[in-house]
Amino acid sequence: MNAKDVIKGIEGKALDWALNYALMLENGFVPEIAGAAGAPSELYSHTDPAVCLWLIKEYRASIDQVEHDPKVQVTIWYEITDSDGSDFDAVSALGDTLEQAVARCVVQMRLGDEVDVPEELAGDAAREVVK
């Protein structure tokens, strides 16, 4: 059974699971990130600095410190292509750490504002609606 986790509050193992799922959907497999993991089949931890750095470079993420708040905001611009042509959109996510914000941003870009995570990984944190 799965539980809905709102990206705004996803953390810990649920965020690791969602990040790996998003990367797998995009690439057809979990990509090998040099120095981040021993093999492509390993699950990446969003707290791994090598994974964070790779994601920042791969998605050209911009990083901002939130004014009067210790949180970090990450924004990624991406291209949307359909039969009418292409356009650009942006997604932003907040996190207590840079690594958390980057992972949330990538997950939200690929999976949307909510993600179904396995029940045993679903946290009680922040089930508020992302606006």
Image (cartoon, grey):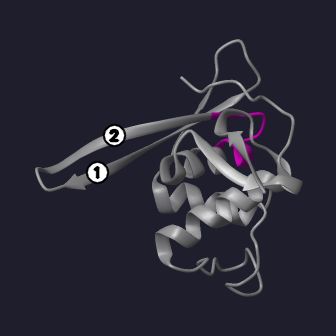
Does 120 appear above or below 95? Answer: below
**In screen coordinates, is 87 left or right of 108?**
left
Counting from the top left corner in percent of width and height, residue 123 is at 85, 42
Q: CB under 8 Å between callouts 1 and 2?
A: yes
Q: Amino acid at mark 1?
A: Ile
Kindly state the secondary structure of the residue where label 1 is placed: strand
Point out the stretch of residues depicted in magenta. 94-101
> Residue 36 in the image: x percent, y percent?
73, 74
- Disc 2 is placed on an element classified as strand
Identity of the residue drawn at 83% across and 53% down: 119
Counting other residues with Cα less than 10 Å from the Cα at mark 1, is it few (<14), some (14-19), or many (20 or more)? few
Residue that lies at the very extreme toward the top in this rendered image: 68
Question: For this rendering, which residue is in front, 35 or 5?
Answer: 5
User: Where is mark 2, residue-wise?
Assistant: 89
> In this rendering, does residue 25 appear at all?
yes
Q: Quadrant of the N terminus?
A: bottom right
Q: Is residue 35 above or below residue 57?
A: below
Residue behind mark 1:
80
| Mark 1 / mark 2, whichever is N-terminal | 1
